[in-house]
Amino acid sequence: MIRPEFLAMLRRGNEVILAAAILGFGLWLIALGGYLLTPLGTAFGAFGVAWAILALRRLRFTQPIDSPGIVEVDEAQIGYLGPQTGGYVSIPELTELRLLSLRGRRVWRLKQADGQALLIPVDATGADKLFDAFASLPGMNTLSLVAALDAKPTTGSTNLSLAAETQTIWRRTAQAALARE
């Protein structure tokens, strides 16, 4: 009875819909007025707005699944299990996050303090879980993270040109590294 495309869109945006419902509930409480309901409604409204902003950023971060492999985020570790490559990196040990364009495909490059790097396709299964992991990095600007994904790859060349096809999203500062130790 309901088109599958519409149901898929509702499932994808369910967090935004819930945030809007909480915002609406807060506005309703404010409209009722009073010394108790107005501050309570304001708190619900503020929570709804903050959650809606975060949910919209997560929604923009999500890409259609088009690459093989599975991304896992578990207990301060990010893992990618692909058909030919894969591995795990520790979130507290990350020193750099880049977005690369390799042969027209975009991948995240996560580099640890020991030099180990992990490449994760942007459109792998479970890659949407990376938003919260990346947002937990000290000094991460989630708006620039989402904006980097909105930009389309510049070329579809077969070689990696660091100047044209690499974008550094986040880098750990020396102060953050000292505070971690």
Image (cartoon, grey):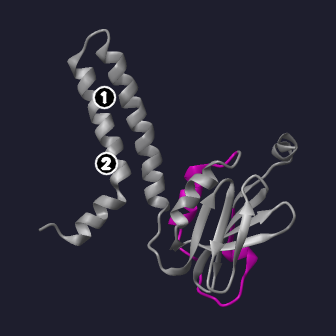
Q: Residues within 10 Å of mark 1 (few under 14, many from 20)?
A: many
Image quarter where the C terminus lies is top right
Q: Which residues are magenta?
A: 139-168
Q: Is residue 121 above or below residue 180?
A: below
Q: Is residue 166 above or below residue 31?
A: below
Identity of the amino acid at label 2? Ile
Q: Which residue is mark 1?
A: 26
The reply, left or right, for residue 6 in relation to residue 181 is left
Residue 151 inside the magenta-drawn segment: yes
- Within the image, what quadrant is residue 166 found in? bottom right
Labels 1 & 2 near each other (Cβ < 8 A)? no
- Within the image, what quadrant is residue 30 found in? top left
Q: Residue 79: image x %, image y %?
A: 66, 67
Name the residue nearer the viewer: 72 or 173: 72
Q: Residue 17: image x %, image y %?
A: 31, 48
Q: Secondary structure at mark 1?
A: helix
Spatial CA span between label 1 and label 2: 14 Å
Q: Residue at x 44, y 44 (%)?
A: 53
Residue placed farthest to the bottom in the image? Answer: 158
Residue placed farthest to the front in the image? Answer: 75
The disc at residue 129 is none
Image quarter where the N terminus lies is bottom left
Q: Which residue is mark 2?
A: 17
Q: Residue 116: image x %, image y %?
A: 82, 69
Q: Secondary structure at mark 2?
A: helix
Q: Residues within 10 Å of mark 2 (few under 14, many from 20)?
A: some
Name the residue nearer the viewer: 122 or 155: 122
Identity of the amino acid at label 1? Gly
Q: Residue 61: image x %, image y %?
A: 50, 61
Residue placed farthest to the top in the image? Answer: 35
Q: Residue at x 69, y 66 (%)?
A: 98
Dot placed on the residue nearer the N-terminal end, 1 or 2: 2
